[in-house]
Structure formats: C-alpha cells, structure tokens
Image (spheres, helix red, strand yellow):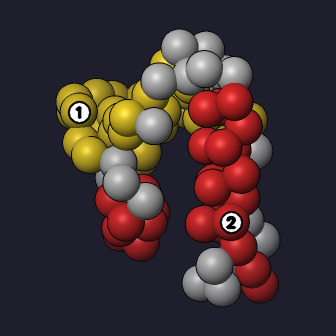
C-alpha cells in the first residue's frame, strides 16, 4: 500500500497477494487507512483505478463507498491505460 494523507488522502496503490483476495482482508486494510486518515482530519479519499485490468477492482471500491469522479488516462511505464478517478467523503 502507498498513500499520502492530506485534506484529500490519495491512495496510490493497494495490492493483495492472490491468496488473500475475496476474504475481506482488503476491506479491513482500507478501513484502517480510512480511520487513520480521519484521525489526521482528512475529509476525502481519492484513488485512480485502471478500468480494463480487473472488473472486481471497480466493484471493490464502489462497495466501499467510492464514486466515479472523472475519466483519465494513466501512463504506466510508457503505456497509456484507461482509468477513472474515484472519490469518497470520509
């Protein structure tokens, strides 16, 4: 996990080993981050989600209260990837 806590906390990446997916661990980890960000007076969370990688990723963030804010393109090691900015008030 990589993140930066500010007024709008930016979660850059949250990766789970395959063995730990679909077991509630990601939700627990994200919940702890949200609690930590709130304790430092953060008001919103933001994450950029690549949309053609795994449909479950968008479902995960939506189920955790995030909503689509804006379509974007991310440059990952010289490759342009379609993505969305998702945000949540905390």
Q: Residue at x 24, y 42 (%)?
A: 68
**In-image side of 21 versus 74 (left or right):** right
Locate residue 63, reporting x and y percent. Answer: 37, 66
Residue 68 vertical placement versus 25 (above, below):
above
Q: Residue at x 71, y 58 (%)?
A: 29
Q: Quadrant of the N terminus?
A: top right
Label 1 residue SS: strand
In the image, 56 versus 11, the foreground residue is 11
Other-residue count near label 1 (Cα within 10 Å), few / some / many at <14 / 14–19 / ≥20: some
Circle 1 residue = 69
In this orientation, does residue 80 appear?
no
Badge 2 vs badge 1, beta-carbon distance below 8 Å: no
**In-image side of 39 versus 22 (left or right):** right
Label 2 vs label 1, nearer the camera: 2
Q: Quadrant of the C terminus?
A: top left
**In-image side of 34 versus 71 (left or right):** right
**In-image side of 67 versus 17 (left or right):** left
Locate residue 39, reporting x and y percent. Answer: 69, 30
In this orientation, does residue 33 appear?
yes
In the image, 41 versus 24, the foreground residue is 41
Circle 2 residue = 28
Label 2 residue SS: helix
For residue 32, the mark is none
Quadrant assignment, res 57? bottom left
In the image, 43 versus 67, the foreground residue is 43
């Amino acid at each position: 996990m990589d993140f930066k806590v500010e007024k709008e906390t930016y979660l850059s990446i949250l990766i789970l080993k395959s063995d730990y997916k679909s077991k509630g661990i990601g939700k627990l980890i994200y919940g702890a981050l949200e609690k930590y960000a709130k304790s430092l007076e953060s008001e919103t969370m933001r994450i950029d989600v690549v949309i053609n990688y795994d449909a479950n990723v968008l479902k995960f963030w939506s189920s955790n209260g995030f909503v689509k804010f804006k379509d974007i393109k991310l440059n990952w090691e010289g490759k342009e990837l379609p993505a969305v900015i998702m945000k949540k008030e905390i």
